[in-house]
Amino acid sequence: MAAQLIDGKATALEIRAEIAQRVEELRGRGIVPGLAVILVGEDPASQIYVRNKGIACEKAGMRSLTLRLPAETTQAELEDRIRELNADSGIHGILVQLPLPGHLDERRALGVIDPKKDVDGFHPINAGRLLAGEKCAVPCTPRGVMELLRRTGLELQGKEAVVIGRSNIVGKPMALLLLQAGCTVTVCHSKTRDLAAHTRRADILVAAVGRAGFVTADMVKEGAAVIDVGINRVDGKVVGDVAFDEVWEKAGFITPVPGGVGPMTIAMLLKNTLEAAGE
């Protein structure tokens, strides 16, 4: 029997409607949540992402500010712009669009952001708070995955979860969130031996490896929830890390690409900004 589709697009629209209602309440108290995005250079994909974030903000009733800096911007100039936004009381969330040009130090730049305005959840202080299970801004994509799992009604307590990928942006925070939800978590990566032996145990399998069609049906447990975080372009089409057509026949639940985790990432960015503004 084919898997149940987890519709991230529909779920994200529901969440964005809830956020817009809360923003309206805050505006009634004189608070307009504001998100500032810093874009360095002219990377085409980054420009699309930034534009979509701005549109999403405005639709939710939030203030949207985009700072477009030339590719030759220096580290000092970038950090100065971040400090100016830290001091701006009308800006509640700051996001530095990644990747930055090669001459810039991403880690240093992210470390300059006020942790209270770090709506991407990448600041070392927020990463530490997440590890400790304390309240903090949670990286948007892993938070979106957790929201999808919860709204699908899946019971997480005691389940075996496997995350393929160990990045600071997705893999590591994803594992921590699943652990906090009561799962037994395994993190796999490029050095993992006999990867399929791990993935076939997973009740919940999260693929965040960045390789098109990497997860095949023989790697998936019958009835598992398969969450595809991958975004890959193949022959002009956007596809995920999961070989969807074959895994669809074996999994219990599955997210599509596009229309799965992607829309949830922007919805969680709005939610993080809303919370930074006074939720």
Image: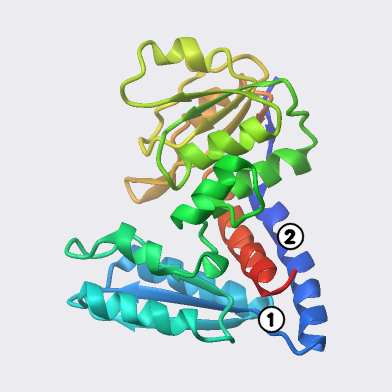
The answer to which quarter of the image holds residue 34 is: bottom right
* Among the two numbered marks 1 and 2 on one chain, the one whose residue lies closer to the N terminus: 2
Task: Please tell me whether mark 2 sits on a helix, a strand or a loop.
Answer: helix
Q: Which residue does the image show at 75% across and 26% down from the upper left?
A: 157
Left or right: where 183 falls relative to 75? right
Q: Which percent across, then down, holds residue 148?
A: 69, 44
Q: Which residue does the image show at 46% across and 74% down from the upper left?
A: 51
The answer to which quarter of the image holds residue 48 is: bottom left
The answer to which quarter of the image holds residue 20 is: bottom right
The answer to whether residue 99 of the structure is visible from this angle is: no
Task: Please tell me whether mark 1 sits on a helix, a strand or a loop.
Answer: loop
Amino acid tagged 2 = Ile
Q: Which percent across, then down, holds residue 14?
A: 76, 59
Left or right: where 154 falls relative to 46? right
Q: Which residue does the image show at 58% across and 86% down from the upper left?
A: 89
Q: Quadrant of the N terminus?
A: top right
Q: Which residue does the image show at 57% across and 61% down from the upper left?
A: 266
Residue 61, which numbered label?
1
Amino acid tagged 1 = Gly
The answer to whether residue 163 of the structure is visible from this angle is: yes
Q: CA distance from mark 1 to mark 2?
A: 14 Å
Q: Residues within 10 Å of mark 1 (few under 14, many from 20)?
A: some
89 up-or-down from 12: above or below = below
- Outermost residue, bottom direction? 30
Residue 15, which numbered label?
2
